Image (cartoon, grey):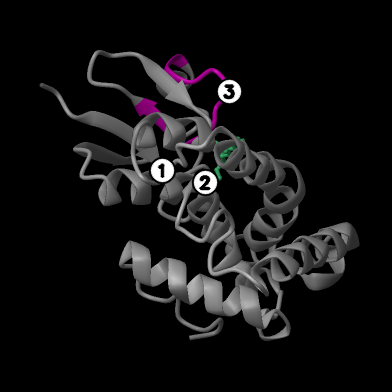
Amino acid sequence: MTAIRLYGSSDSGNCLKTKWVAERLGIRFEWIETSSFSGATRTPEFLAINPAGQVPVAILADGRMLAQSNAIMLYFAENSDLVPKDAYERAKMLEWLFWEQYSHEPYIAVRIARKYFLNQREEDLDPVLLTKGAAALARLELQLQGAPFLVNGALTLADIALVAYTRAAPRGGFDLESYPAVKAWVGRVERELGLEPLPPVGQ
Ligand SMILES: N[C@@H](CCC(=O)N[C@@H](CS)C(=O)NCC(=O)O)C(=O)O
């Protein structure tokens, strides 16, 4: 059977989180590097695949298309230990996934993109990105002060979704030294996923 095709950018936490889940669960896939910075998500060919013009996109073995990083992760992880069996714990995991997309990614990922990848000057960045991003890190810190993972003491999709941009937050000008529980959790999740820590910014 044809493997799943995963269109994604290696610079994007949204894309990497789907790749990490597939790798951890031994799901066969072909990675098709598609950078939003190079305009590859705006070509007629790509828009025919995903009219929203965004990566990640999965083309399943039977040809069906699935977009949105958290939907793709959930599809891959169905019936795996990355999704709690208990209805309340599963809903708590979803609570974090929705929070990630509304209260974390729009600030931390956007600041990383503008500052690190597009080299925009500090004074040209919307100050809200810093305050709301710091608030998101403080919320994670509160949760992780008393728990090794976000939900029910074990690795779930919530950790994978949230670690994607949190580990890269220093690229957006956020200092993880101010969030020691978050920093320790990043290391824990990286070890679970077999990821090398990102090099310090500037190296
Ligand atoms: N909520 C979407 C966000 C996807 C997204 O913003 N993708 C970016 C790369 S990280 C993209 O393709 N941007 C191109 C564009 O919006 O034109 C998800 O989680 O998949």
Between the residue at mark 3 and the residue at mark 2, the CA separation in whole angstroms equals 15 Å
Which labelled disc corresponds to residue 191?
Answer: none
49 within the magenta span? yes
Camera-side residue: 179 or 200? Answer: 179
Q: Is residue 10 above or below residue 147?
A: above
* Secondary structure character of the magenta stretch overall: loop
Residue tagged 1: 18
Horizontally, is 176 left or right of 129 in the view? Answer: left
Neighbour class for label 3 at 10 Å: few (<14), some, many (≥20)? few
Q: Position of residue 59 (x, y in %)?
A: 33, 23
Which of the marked residues, 1 or 3, is nearer the chain's N terminus?
1
Lower position in the chain sequence, tag 3 or tag 2: 2
Q: Are marks 3 and 2 in contact (CB under 8 Å)?
A: no
Label 3: state its secondary structure: loop
Q: Distance between the residues labelled 1 and 3?
A: 18 Å
Which residue is tagged 3? 52
Q: Identify the image quadrant of residue 73.
A: top left
Q: Give the range drawn in magenta.
A: 48-58
Q: Do the residues labelled 2 and 1 touch (CB within 8 Å)?
A: yes
Q: Percent position (x, y) of residue 68?
A: 53, 31
Residue type at numbered disc 2: Asn
Comparing 173 with 140, the one in front is 140
The crowd level at tag 1 (other Cα within 10 Å; few <14, some 14-19, many 20+) is: many
Q: Which residue sits at x=74%, y=42%? A: 102
User: Which x, y percent locates residue 146?
Assistant: 65, 72
For the point 36% across and 72% down, the residue is 191
Q: Name the residue under label 2.
A: 14
Q: In which quarter of the image is the N terminus?
A: top left
Which of 42 and 95 lies nearest the eye of the viewer?
95
Count of labels in the image: 3
